[in-house]
């Protein structure tokens, strides 16, 4: 594109707000990003948060000229492939600026810096060290633990029991994380660290934009507790307690050809992000998928018929997973409707151009997995749950990106998909789940997308799938049509 056609940053469309109002608009975004992005999308595929620019919203730094939002698969591709132009950063980036003079900042950097926040050689080096823990053969070893824990989960439920299914899946994926990530059944300790991480995630949007001092202090306290917990787990692993074929054991043992290893600080950051990404988001996918199946009896019947045909009433085994083809389509479609990660962000590492616009160094760029997955150009009737569509479509990695795409694609994606498929197969083979009628189910969004609760009743797997659905209310009706 010739330089004559490039427009200055100030020409990027934006809502008619003054730049001194940006904090109010930014707070709305942190509390409900999908609603704000729906509004912004009306201005085009490249939109600024406010006219005149704004201070840092997503990344550390005092020289941020502003935040822009981009929509569409082609822009996803540019942002995710031009890795020299668009850098990743820590998910708690803005908090670094607020704490820049505080000696405790080191703790926040440790727990908030994982693989996806690194760039260039640092990213390549650490991904190379972490990758062996997620090779296919390793994941097949983890799958045995996933099957065992799913068996324990279904054993504790009784027919007629009413569940907050979101909480049940939160607890279930914590147990999987404890066993597969650490090689141990931490019991109460696992729940403790899981609840700490949940609180940490809840505090991030609150402290992202000029939060009260009490919120900053609470965020630091939880960060320090997570740091202490993970450091203790690493110490146990180094001492040989629970040594085995788990992820942490692999990360502690790994050395590259030059003898390079992961440092203690690097291990803490990676473990926290793996727990965060591999625990809550997986729980969310499981909750949304079971809910969608209950609300779509015809689809649930097809899933059960496949389970019955493939497993013939016997227990699930790893070698049977590949035969559950329609279940794969159900999972794909669930993650399209309710993507585990709703938005992604990058920052320009230097002056660059995007489409017709010049972007100064430090420009924050936000792209949307959710809006891509709900683009009617890519997906017919995008708000409807139609797993059968996957037999006829093959979207590119930039049109369908539940785990992001490119060199920064989530390293734990195969692990998560294996866990989701195993858990669903075992739960649905054993039980039918019924939605509690007239429930109000609200979405809770920051980066992950979860229901605030998911009221389901455990029923016998009696094939009466038409009895599973119910009328519900809440903000999820803005995202999916029944």
Image (cartoon, rainbow, N blue to C red):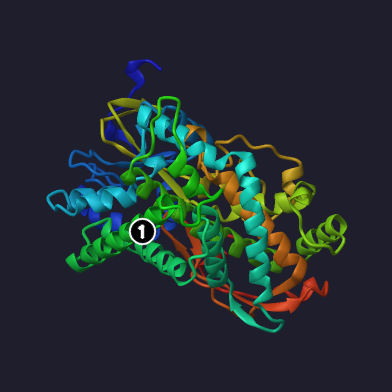
Q: Position of residue 255 (x, y in %)?
A: 44, 33
Foreground of the two, 185 or 289: 185
Foreground of the two, 115 or 40: 115
Q: Which residue is mark 1?
A: 232
Quadrant of res 24: bottom left
Horizontal side of residue 160 vs 455, given as left or right: right
Q: Is residue 132 above or below residue 4?
A: below
- Residue at 26% in and 41% down: 66
Quadrant of res 354: top left
- Residue at 49% in and 55% down: 182
- Residue at 26% in and 31% down: 361
Q: Position of residue 334 (x, y in %)?
A: 63, 55
Q: Position of residue 229 (x, y in %)?
A: 35, 61
Foreground of the two, 215 or 151: 151
Horizontal side of residue 155 vs 163, given as left or right: right
- Residue at 56% in and 60% down: 176
């Amino acid at each position: 594109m010739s330089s004559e056609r490039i427009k200055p940053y100030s020409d990027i469309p934006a809502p008619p707000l003054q730049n001194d109002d940006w904090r109010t608009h930014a707070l709305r975004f942190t509390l409900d990003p999908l609603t704000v992005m729906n509004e912004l999308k009306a201005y085009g595929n490249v939109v600024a948060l406010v006219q005149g620019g704004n201070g840092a919203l997503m990344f550390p730094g005092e020289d941020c000229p502003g935040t822009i939002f981009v929509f569409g698969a082609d822009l996803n591709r540019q942002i995710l492939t031009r890795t020299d132009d668009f850098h990743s950063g820590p998910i708690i980036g803005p908090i670094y600026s607020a704490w820049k003079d505080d000696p405790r900042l080191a703790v926040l950097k440790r727990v908030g810096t994982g693989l996806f926040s690194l760039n260039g050689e640092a990213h390549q080096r650490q991904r190379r060290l972490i990758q062996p823990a997620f090779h296919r053969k390793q994941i097949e070893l983890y799958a045995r633990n996933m099957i065992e824990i799913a068996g324990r989960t279904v054993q504790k439920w009784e027919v007629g029991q009413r569940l907050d299914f979101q909480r049940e899946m939160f607890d279930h994926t914590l147990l999987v994380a404890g066993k597969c990530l650490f090689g141990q059944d931490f019991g109460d300790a696992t729940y403790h660290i899981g609840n700490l991480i949940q609180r940490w995630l809840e505090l991030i949007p609150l402290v992202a934009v000029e939060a009260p001092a009490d919120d900053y202090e609470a965020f630091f306290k939880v960060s320090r507790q997570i740091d202490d917990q993970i450091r203790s787990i690493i110490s146990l692993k180094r001492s040989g307690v629970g040594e085995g074929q788990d992820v942490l054991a692999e990360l502690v043992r790994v050395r590259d050809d030059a003898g390079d290893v992961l440092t203690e600080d690097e291990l803490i950051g990676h473990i926290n992000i793996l727990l965060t990404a591999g625990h809550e988001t997986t729980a969310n996918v499981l909750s949304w998928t079971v809910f969608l199946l209950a609300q779509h009896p015809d689809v649930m019947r097809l899933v059960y018929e496949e389970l019955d045909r493939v497993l013939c009433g016997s227990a699930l085994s790893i070698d049977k997973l590949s035969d559950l083809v329609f279940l794969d389509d159900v999972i794909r479609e669930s993650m399209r409707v309710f993507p585990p990660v709703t938005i992604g962000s990058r920052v320009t590492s230097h002056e660059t151009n995007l489409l017709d616009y010049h972007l100064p160094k430090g420009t924050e760029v936000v792209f949307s997995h959710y809006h891509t997955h709900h683009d009617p150009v890519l997906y017919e009737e995008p708000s409807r749950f139609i797993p059968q569509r996957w037999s006829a479509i093959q979207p590119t990695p930039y049109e369908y990106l539940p785990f992001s795409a490119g060199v920064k694609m989530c390293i734990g994606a195969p692990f998560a998909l294996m866990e989701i498929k195993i858990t669903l197969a075992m739960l649905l083979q054993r039980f039918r789940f019924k939605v509690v009628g007239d429930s109000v189910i609200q979405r809770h969004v920051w980066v992950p997308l979860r229901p605030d609760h998911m009221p389901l009743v455990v029923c016998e797997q009696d094939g009466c799938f038409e009895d599973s659905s119910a009328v519900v209310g809440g903000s999820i009706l803005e995202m999916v049509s029944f």
